[in-house]
Structure formats: C-alpha cells, structure tokens
Image (tube, coloured by chain):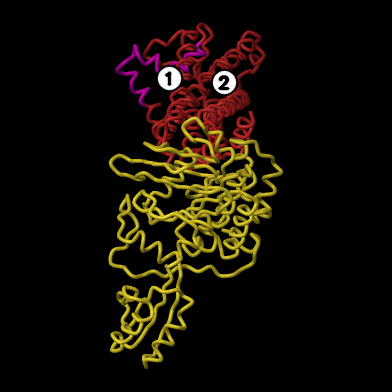
Chain colours: A red, B yellow
Amino acid sequence: MRLFVATIRKLVRRPATFITFGLLVGLMALIFVAVGATARQQPSASAQEAALLLVTFPGAYAFIISFILGLGGLFGVIYGAAIAGSEWTWGTLKAAVARGESRSRYQLWSFGAIALMLGIGLLGAFLVGVLVAIVGASLAGVSTAGLGDSTSLGQLPELLARGWLGIVEEGALGFAIATVARSQLAGVGVGIAVYFAEQFVTFFLPDIVKFLPFNAASAVVAVSGSGFGDSGGTQFARLDPNAALIVVALWLIGALVLTSLFTERAEISG
Amino acid sequence: MTPTDGLALATRGLEKRYGPRVALAGLDLSVPTGVVYGFLGPNGAGKTTTMRLLTGLIHPDAGTIEILGQPFRRGDRRRLYQVGALIETPSFYPYLSGRENLRALAATGAHTSNRRVEELLELVGLRDRARDKVQGYSLGMKQRLGIAAALLSDPRLLLLDEPANGLDPAGIVAMRETLRHLASIGKTVFISSHVLGEVQQLADMVGIIAAGQLVREGQIDQLLEGEGVVRVRVAPDELESATRILHALAGDGAIAPVDGEEGWLSIRIEPGRAAEVNRALALAGVYASGLETGSDLESLFLALTAGAPSASHEGTFFGLAGSTKTDSTPAGPTNWLGGGGAA
C-alpha cells in the first residue's frame, strides 16, 4: 500500500500528469467554444442542427464522453508509456529492485496508481467538458435546460465507470509497450504508432478491428439508443457494450501480465 | 570450493555472458564482515556486471552468490533488505526534490521511516537543498543523494560503485570517514572504484579483477609488501654505473630503466630505503638529480592487469603507455557540509 501511495505522490507532482490532462481539456474546450461560436453560421440547416446538437444537453453528455474516450485513449496510452518508460530511462526501477522490491509488485502498484490518476483525470475532464459545453451552448444561444435530464444523469455513473475501464486498458497498453521497449521515448512513440495503426487497420480488417484495444475501449460506453459513445462515422460494426467490457478486461489483464512477466525476467542493466 | 563462513559477501565460480562476450569467467570473491573492500579492475573487467549480479538486477549463468551468509538466488530478493547499493550513476526522479526522492525510494524494499530520510539528508549535507528538485543538483549533490539512498535501510552490507565520482575534496574526505565509521561498527563496505589512491586510503582489503576473473585478493598491507618502488634519475652517461651500484643494493632483477623517461631507473625496493639508494649512488660518485618513492596500489594494479585484455576491449589508450600518475586526495574539512556545489 505504501508503494501505491508513494506512486500517487510521484504522479501528482509529475509534469506529464498535468500536460496530458491540460492538452485533453484544452482541446475539448477549444472544440466546444468553436462549435458554440460558429454553430449558427453553418451554411446548411442540417449542418447547423448537427453543430447545435453537440452543445445541447442532455446529448452533449454523450459527446463529452465519446470525445474523452476517443482522444483521451491516445493520451491514456501516452501517459501509461511515459510513466513506465521513465522508470527504465531514469533508472528508478533499478534502484527499487536493488533495494529488494518485488519487480512485479512494483509495476502493478505503479499501474494501480496510474489507474487512479486516469480515473481522476476522466472525472475532471468530464466536469470541464460539461462546463465548456455550457459555455458553448450560451455562445450558440441554446438552452441548457437538458442539463438536469434525470435519465441521462442516472446513466452517467455507470458510463463513467465503463469509460474509466476503457481508459485504464489503454493506459495499460502504453504501460506494457514502454516496459517492453524499456524506454520512455520509444514507449510513447510505439504507443502512438499502435493507436494510429489500429485506426488504419479499420480499412483492411473491419471484422477484426472491433476486438482491438482502442475500438473495444470506445465500445464499452456505446449504449444503444442513447447515442452515448458513438461519435458517428464508423465504418464497421462495434462490439456490444457488455461484450466490449469483456474484451477490454482481457486486454487489460493481458497487458498487465505481459508487463509483470517481462519485468520479472528482464536483465536490468541501464 | 573455499568455505564462505564469516563472510559478508562471497561468490563462487560466478559466470556471466552477454551473447558471445564473456563478462565474468568464474569470479570467486571473499569479503569478510566489517571491512572496507576495494574492488578494482580496468574498464570492462566485469566490475559493474558483478555489482548488478550482487543486487539481483541481472542473473548469473553459473556460480553462486552468498550475501550475509545466505544464498542469494532468483527469488531471494528480501536478502537485499540488508544491503544498500549505489550502482553506476545515482537514479532519481528529476522533477522531485531530494527529500521526495528518498521518500519515494523508502517506500520500496525494507521499511524505512521518514526520520531516517531526514537523518541521511543531514549526514550527506543536503538538508538545506532537500526541497530543491534533483534536476537542479550538481553531479556531486546527486552522488551524495545516491549515497544517502544506499544507506536508507541502515544496511549491513553496502555496495558502492565509484562512490567518489563527482564529489569535491571535502565530500571525499567526509565520505571516507563515514564509510570507515560504518566498517568500525561491523558493517561491510564493498567499493568498486578506479581511483586507486582513494581505495588505498580507505580499504582494508582489495580484490583485483581482470578479464572477468579475480587476479588478486587480500589485505591491502600484505598485498603491497614487496610492491615498493624507488625511482632515481641520473645523467644518461651514468646509467650503466648506477645500475651496477643499485644491483648490489637491491639484487638482480630489481632494477629497470623507466620506459620513455631518459635517465630514470626503477628499483623494486621498500620506499623507506630511498635515502640508502641515494647514499649508495653518492658514495660511488653518481649524483641523483631526481628521486621518487612509491608503495602503491597502482603499481600492483598495473602489474596484475597490464596487458590483460578487458572482456569488452574497453579502456585501453593505445600508444599512451607509461602514464601511471595516481590521483591524490587533498586534505579538507571532515564533514559533508564543506562543499558539493550547486548546479
């Protein structure tokens, strides 16, 4: 437990934590403000309607969550890779192992702390998203009466919990990649490459891609009929949210097992 | 196999390969309890590989390790709770302060209190800079923090890789006193170093490694017996007569010209007999224009390792033979607070 608390303390002070969170909410704020400011200036009525929907509650909740799971997934991979990779790059894993710390315990508690930080980040980003959506709505002259829609609000805790699992899985993937790469830079680079490679695979393996980690993570909150988690434009069938949950759990466990096994067997020479 | 009773650290037949390269080829170390042990060897001889093996960072291909009288194998990580180590460069989170780094490290391995962290910051003279981020520390300050990190769990066995690296003279003196004090209270200090003068001042025992094997191990005083050297300079046209005179004094095979230094002769004789050398020459009408003495580890080290190819073929300056001057350690204040310098 002291390892978990110590890692939380490290992450709270770490610039990567704030940079990742800041980039995510900054981009989200930019999009909502831009949409709110320009929604009424769209050339066609259908485009105007679509833009206004993004800042109209309760539908805006859906867009906020899907945005966080989409771009946030990339940031989750980068964050996980940055934390795991730096342990090798800075030699801090070496120092812990030389003190007799269990390698896998160290990695798993470290990832536990990352998972908590991702949860806090998800919640924080969601709250910021709601605030900037309200700003966007007021810029667009749209009523915010739907903010208190009880059906949507009732779904939020479960959706946020599912979204957290999705982001944690993406973070675990970055964590595992950087561990195998033994490098912060290589881990982040490969993590980003894997993220975009999965989007690219969509064109060639539409039946397979839904089982891949990022698509499965997005699918965990795709509640049919509510519009949650479906950002539109997908060219392939998504997994059912509950099936996606299982796939995400498998990817998560697989990534952590890989991390543990690799760390246990690694020759630490840096 | 040599018995390992009473040893703080012992390796027997330790072997390690990196692909085709042999890093250790059957290393047998015997480090008694309560000594400062200097572990010496040229670059690439296998010192750092040994350190990594002793701390479980890598695993041997063959051979055994005993730490504090117990076998140390894969899975025996708790044995390291009684070991403190500084391997290669000190490893810290650059964005955290010195204090936060020590606390983060204290959360791993053996339980360590915050009070211990404060004591160590005081010991290594970093209390005033403990709140500053490590990325702003000088090399010497990082080294001090690394030594503090190695001492966190009040270890019975301390493994230090080049501990004087980056320390200023005052820091070196203070470190030496700290390590001597630790040995005096029964702890064992194992130091890998290139600074032979420093090891000679600090260590009770040395082990010299070359090409992955131990070539000499023992009490430093005993090893240096017979390693004394007196060097004398005479006029080049008097070299022959000087050699004849000194043969009579030191015996056959004890006299040799110093390569690359015209007029210099090296005499393998106790340094305390330097005046006798001078007198013998003067009585025969040969006047020395230079006289140097040395009974140093450097001579022994070079004798044992010169020409021994390093396992990694590192560290040889081809064409620069004969440069053997040892670093000396200036006197200075005897506490860690005397220097260190901010970055």
Which residues, given as a range, are shown in magenta?
A: A197-222
Whether residue B190 appears in this view of the structure is: yes
Residue displayed at 43% across by 38% down: B64
Residue displayed at 38% across by 27% down: A194
Percent coordinates x, y for residue A93 in the rendering: 51, 38
How far apart are the alpha carbons under marks 1 and 2?
29 Å
Percent coordinates x, y for residue A119 in the rendering: 59, 24
Left or right, B56 with respect to B121, comes to left
Q: Which residue is mark 1?
A: A213
Residue that extends furthest to the bottom in the rendered view of this protein = B285
Task: Work out whether residue B130 or residue A265 is closer to the camera in this orientation and state it.
Answer: A265
Q: Secondary structure at mark 2?
A: loop
Q: Is residue A206 above or below residue B145?
A: above
Q: Which residue is mark 2?
A: A55
Percent coordinates x, y for residue B106 in the rendering: 62, 39
Residue B246, located in which quarter of the rendered image?
A: bottom left
Q: Is residue A129 above or below residue B91?
A: above
1 or 2: tag closer to the N-terminus? 2
* Other residues around mark 2 within 10 Å, as few (<14) / some (14–19) / many (≥20): many
Whether residue A136 appears in this view of the structure is: no
Percent coordinates x, y for residue B320 in the rendering: 31, 68
Disc 2 chain ID: A
- Picture quarter with the N terminus of chain B: top left
